[in-house]
Image (cartoon, rainbow, N blue to C red):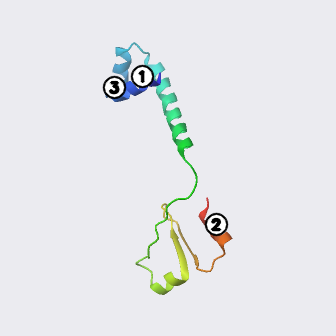
Amino acid sequence: MFAHVEACRDSNQPQKIYCKQYSIAYSTFQYWAKKYREASSEHEATEFTPGFIPVKVEPDPEMNQVTIANQLHFLFPNGIQVMCPESVHPDVLKTLLNP
């Protein structure tokens, strides 16, 4: 069934036309396509391996150098910013940076 879903996708034909051409009930094909999407999303989820992520360290041009020298500033991709003193306890950083 997945071979048909992939073949239909690769053919660039509308699904209904593909189903007619291969004598497949459209509702059956929709079921196969749903299962294909579910299997694909499960496969992508299992490929994720937790671990270290790269961190880009650069000075913030909007902050003065005195503030930067005394604080750690984390800017996350979702826009959340965390600022803490340079002397923050490592356990606090661990809590802040781990989801």
The one of 79 and 4 positioned closer to us in this rendering: 4
Residue behind mark 1: 4
Work out whether mark 3 precedes mark 1 in sequence or the reverse, and give the earlier one. Answer: 1
Residue behind mark 3: 14
> Which residue: 38% across, 14% down?
22
Quarter of image, res 51: bottom right
> Would you place residue 43 above or below residue 64 in this image?
above
> Would you place residue 13 above or below residue 69 in this image?
above
Number of disc labels? 3
Indicate the amino acid at tag 2: Lys
- Residue at the bottom extreme of this rendering: 66
Camera-near label (3 vs 1) is 1
> Which residue: 42% across, 15% down?
24
Q: Secondary structure at mark 3?
A: loop
Alpha carbon of mark 2 to alpha carbon of mark 1: how far? 48 Å
Residue behind mark 2: 94
> Which residue: 54% across, 76% down?
72
Indicate the amino acid at tag 3: Pro
Q: Secondary structure at mark 2?
A: helix
Camera-near label (2 vs 3) is 2
x, y percentage for residue 68? 49, 81
> Would you place residue 45 above or below residue 50 in this image?
above
> Would you place residue 56 above or below residue 16 in this image?
below
